Amino acid sequence: MTGELHLTVVYEESDDGWVVASVPQVPGAMSQGRTRAEARENVVDALALMLSPETGDVGAEDREPLHFTLVA
């Protein structure tokens, strides 16, 4: 099976001048930056960290790796 994963980045201006970026489809995937470009880069990094498997996970024998490429 081949397919694509489509996610949305939402940008909000904070009161202190920072740009907050979040990915609504992945709860907790959010970051910020001084500019929209920096916020985008930071949220993509946060998303990659959140979706990366942790070594030593309990029940790892019942899991199958899923690989995808994030093009941002």
Image: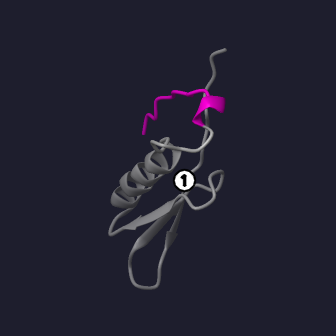
Please state, as top left, top right, bottom left or bottom right, where the C terminus lies in the image.
top left
Q: Is residue 60 left or right of residue 45?
A: right
> Which sits in the foreground, 72 or 55?
55
Q: Which residue is label 1 attached to? A: 9
> Which region shows up in magenta?
60-72
**How would you rate the neighbour count of disc 1 (Cα within 10 Å): few for under 14, some for 14-19, many for 20 or more?**
some
Farthest-out residue, bottom: 15
Type of amino acid at the residue the image marks with label 1: Val
How did the renderer colour the structure? Answer: one colour
Where 51 falls versus 36 (above or below)? above
State which quadrant residue 55 falls in.
top left
Estimate the x, y position of residue 60 in percent, counting from the top left. 58, 35
Where 66 falls versus 50 (above or below)? above
Is 19 covered by the magenta stretch?
no
> Which sits in the foreground, 18 or 46?
46
SS at badge 1: loop
Estimate the x, y position of residue 50 in percent, counting from the top left. 50, 50
Identify the residue at horizontal 47%, vertical 79% (top origin): 14
